[in-house]
Image (cartoon, rainbow, N blue to C red):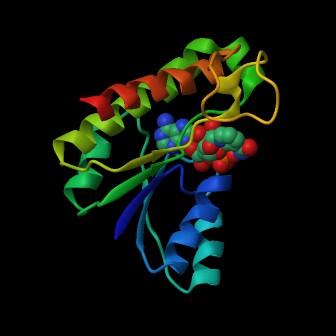
């Protein structure tokens, strides 16, 4: 399988790239490097013996995202790219709504155009807010209490509607 990992130079993304390569998949990475560097992929390549194809792309640039899909037969997407600091999201909500929501909308619009139907989205436990007891389970009612968590909740809703459609 050829798997696109957005946010693939980041913390969880780079570990996922390694696991995918170890499982025999080809990996394409898209990241704008706002919170990471290409060094992580160099180290992953050292461990796996295989280089992931890297594209420095900002997901808010839909044309740039489309170009990567046009040049690759992507089978599935694992979507990690996003801003993730709760405190910063309270100070700068617009930055979070724009980056996380517009980035995701562009990604799924491009996936639709290229007939790619499989996506795993990295949401967050923050969607469960503070009204649920730990440990959280997926059946619990969601209700984030900060802008970062709300971007995740809203993306979950969008993906759920798409799944239904
Ligand atoms: N680390 C955690 O404990 C945790 C827990 C729950 C959910 N998550 C979610 O998992 C994902 C990955 O988390 P992480 O800890 O690896 O974070 P991270 O910051 O290391 O990785 C996110 C990556 O996304 C990239 N990015 C951000 N906006 C982008 C954009 N518009 N276009 C392209 N790339 C962009 C960043 O450069 C970074 O490399 C995030 O979406 C985060 O919200 C993380």
Q: Quadrant of ligand 1?
A: top right
Residue 93 spot, x, y in % from top left:
62, 13
User: Relative to 57, is 152 on the left or the right?
Assistant: right
Q: Which quadrant, please, contains the C terminus?
A: top left
Q: Position of residue 60 (x, y in %)?
A: 40, 32
Foreground of the two, 124 or 165: 165
Query: What's the residue at 72%, 13% (across, down)?
Result: 91
Q: Quadrant of residue 13?
A: bottom right
Is residue 18 depicted above or below 66 in this figure? below
Query: In the picture, residue 38 is in which quadrant?
Result: bottom right
- Residue in the foreground of this view, choosing between 118 and 28: 118
Q: Does residue 18 appear anywhere in the picture?
A: yes
Q: Residue at image x 51%, y 70%? A: 20
Q: What residue is shown at x 54% (from left), y 56% (from top)?
A: 8
Residue 150: give x, y in percent of width and height.
59, 18
Quarter that holds the N terminus: bottom left
The furthest residue to the right: 134
Instruction: Answer with the quarter of the image where residue 158 lies.
Output: top left
Q: Count the marks.
A: 0
**In front here: 80 or 143?**
143
Q: Along the horizontal axis of the image, is 118 left or right of 7?
A: left
Q: Residue at x 55, y 23 (%)?
A: 153
Residue ranking furthest to the front:
139
Q: Is residue 34 at all visible to an observer of this figure? A: no
């Amino acid at each position: 399988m050829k798997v696109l990992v957005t946010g693939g130079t980041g913390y969880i993304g780079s570990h996922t790239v390694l696991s995918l390569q170890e499982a025999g998949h080809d990996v394409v990475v898209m990241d704008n490097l706002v919170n990471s560097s290409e060094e992580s992929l160099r180290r992953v390549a050292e461990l796996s013996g295989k280089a992931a194809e890297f594209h420095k792309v900002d997901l808010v640039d839909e044309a740039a995202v489309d170009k990567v899909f046009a040049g690759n037969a992507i089978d599935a997407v694992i979507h990690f790219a996003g801003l993730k600091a709760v405190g910063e999201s309270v100070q700068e909500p617009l930055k979070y709504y724009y980056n996380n929501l517009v980035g995701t909308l562009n990604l799924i619009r491009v996936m639709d155009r290229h007939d790619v139907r499989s996506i795993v989205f990295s949401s967050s436990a923050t969607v469960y807010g503070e009204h649920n007891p730990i440990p959280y389970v997926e059946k619990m009612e969601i209700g984030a209490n900060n802008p970062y968590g709300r971007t995740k909740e809203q993306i979950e809703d969008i993906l759920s509607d798409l799944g239904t459609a």
